[in-house]
């Protein structure tokens, strides 16, 4: 079938906005391993999970059989304020690289929060409001998730308490102020306001924090205050479910113009963006209907896929959350303070971990100086200042396009542009001033962190 003339930006009609999220687990032969109770080392029940998470979100977290879960009308109406998001052909980047490859990116930065995180934030806040809760607690690394959740909570009239990784809190004062403008309280983590925060500060004096630390504090506050629940911006099954709207829209737009991607690339920290982007494509791959090369890109300073182990581990540094079987560097791992942007989580989504373990996707790690070089190249030719997280995908998309230049192959490359980098200017300044460096953990350091994994599979 002849390819239609492709415009610079492909927009779906509002009426084409997906009416249901796609649950990738329904098509997985090997399901993700269950979350475990840290006290009993047995699978968490719905009743146990509901002490931490909203009831409806727990049902979504545990559902492994329903392929499509309807999106409530109120959430769809909110989505319509910024969705469908554009699918963009990077004509100018292609020309600059001199590649025969066709490069597309799904741009998720066209909303006030500046990233894809709002797709799940509004859903989780909606279910919290419907449950009659006062508010929610959460963590945030680079700040995109905290910003998105504070925006969603402001819209629905919920209280929002955010624990922000300390190094990001200090480096990104404007991201912090956006959250406060939307009514959220923002606390640098680890703090002295929680038991777990005080313990982490005592164990790691002067620590710059990690997502694992912030998660522990947010969970403690949620479980010790009536009317509050904890919500998470990545990793969990429910989050990847909500983010599937990215991939569903992308596939619909590509199908509309008879485009089939050969390579799909996404940055990977906890898995929300990558999992959402690849969901319907991976579903086709699992069902044997199509094949795609899928690449997860992570930072060399926090390489859970490429250098982690596939074991059960705590999702948080304070070891109060359920255990998840995932690729992990160890719950006490804290990325170097010079690591810019998000993608700081020590583990990876159980869904993506299982798919990676089963060979359905591959992973690479890249150094941040090369990531910012790619970000600069992209910004100058495509006119969008990308988030550092997104720039990991840009880096590998450029690498793959240059390989096509060498071989003459006309492959179609798709990557996720998760958001904008206008609150990441301290990192861009360091890169522009030539003082940004790469800090990569040694094998000895990583061995120290994974040595104390709980490893419940040996006793179950």
Image (tube, rainbow, N blue to C red):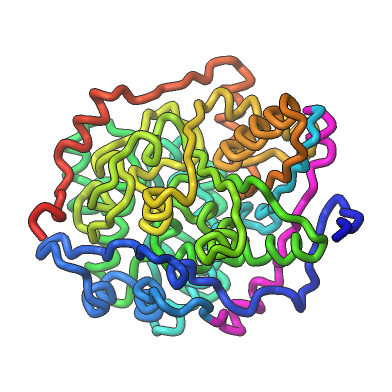
Residue 96, percent across and down? 82, 28
Image quarter of the N terminus: bottom right
- Horizontal side of 2 relative to 151 (left or right) equals right
Q: In this view, does 442 lie above or below 298?
A: above
Q: Which residue is drawn at 42% across and 77% down?
A: 128
Q: Which residue is drawn at 61% across and 49% down?
A: 418
- Horizontal side of 292 relative to 1 (left or right) equals left
Residue 43, percent across and down? 20, 68
Image quarter of the C terminus: bottom left
Whether residue 93 is in magenta: the answer is yes
Question: Does any portion of residue 136 appear in the rendered image?
Answer: yes
Total marks in image: 0
Q: Quadrant of residue 227?
A: bottom left
Specify the farthest residue to the top: 434
- Horizontal side of 300 relative to 72 (left or right) equals left
Q: What stretch is highlighted in magenta?
A: 70-97
Q: Residue at x 68, y 29 (%)?
A: 403
Specify the farthest residue to the right: 5
Q: In which quarter of the image is residue 7?
A: bottom right
Q: Is residue 396 above or below residue 32?
A: above
Residue 354, percent across and down? 37, 55
Question: Does any portion of residue 134 appear in the rendered image?
Answer: no
Q: Which residue is drawn at 45% across and 36% down?
A: 170
Q: Quadrant of residue 97?
A: top right
């Amino acid at each position: 079938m002849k390819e239609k003339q492709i415009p610079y930006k492909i927009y779906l009609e509002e009426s084409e906005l997906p009416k249901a999220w796609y649950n990738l687990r329904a098509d997985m032969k090997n399901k993700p391993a269950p979350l475990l109770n840290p006290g009993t080392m047995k699978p968490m029940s719905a009743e146990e999970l509901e002490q931490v998470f909203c009831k409806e979100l727990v049902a979504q977290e545990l559902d492994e059989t329903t392929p499509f879960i309807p999106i409530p009308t109120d959430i769809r109406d909110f989505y319509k304020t910024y969705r469908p998001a554009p699918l963009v052909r990077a004509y100018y980047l292609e020309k600059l690289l001199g590649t025969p490859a066709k490069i597309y990116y799904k741009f998720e930065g066209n909303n006030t929060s500046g990233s894809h995180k709002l797709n799940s934030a509004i859903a989780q806040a909606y279910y919290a409001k419907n449950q009659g809760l006062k508010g929610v607690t959460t963590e945030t690394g680079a700040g995109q998730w905290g910003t998105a959740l504070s925006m969603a909570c402001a819209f629905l009239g919920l209280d929002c308490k955010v624990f922000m990784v300390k190094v990001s809190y200090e480096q990104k004062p404007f991201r912090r102020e956006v959250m406060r403008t939307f009514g959220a309280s923002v606390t640098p983590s680890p703090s002295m306001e929680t038991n777990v925060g005080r313990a982490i500060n005592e164990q790691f004096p002067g620590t710059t924090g990690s997502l694992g630390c912030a998660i522990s504090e947010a969970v403690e506050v949620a479980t010790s205050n009536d009317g509050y629940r904890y919500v998470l911006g990545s990793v969990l099954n429910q989050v990847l479910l909500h983010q599937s709207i990215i991939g569903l829209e992308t596939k619909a737009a590509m199908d509309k113009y008879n485009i089939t991607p050969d390579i799909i690339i996404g940055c990977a920290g906890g898995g929300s963006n990558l999992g959402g982007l690849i969901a319907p494509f991976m579903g086709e791959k699992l069902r044997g209907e199509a094949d795609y090369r899928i690449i997860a890109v992570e930072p060399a300073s926090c390489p859970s896929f490429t250098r982690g182990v596939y074991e059960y581990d705590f999702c948080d540094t304070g070891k109060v959350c359920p255990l998840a079987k995932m690729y992990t560097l160890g719950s006490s791992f804290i990325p170097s303070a010079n690591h810019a942007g998000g993608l700081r989580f020590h583990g990876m989504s159980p869904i993506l971990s299982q798919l990676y373990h089963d060979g359905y996707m591959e992973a690479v790690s890249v150094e941040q100086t090369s990531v910012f070089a790619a970000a600069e190249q992209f910004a100058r030719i495509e006119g969008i200042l990308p988030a550092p997280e997104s720039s990991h995908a840009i880096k590998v998309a450029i690498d793959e396009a240059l390989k096509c230049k060498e071989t003459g192959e006309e492959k179609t490359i798709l990557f996720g542009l998760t958001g904008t980098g206008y609150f990441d200017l301290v990192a861009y300044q360091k890169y522009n001033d030539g003082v940004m460096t790469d800090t990569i953990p040694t094998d000895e350091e990583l061995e120290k962190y994974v040595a104390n994994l709980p490893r419940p599979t040996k006793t179950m």
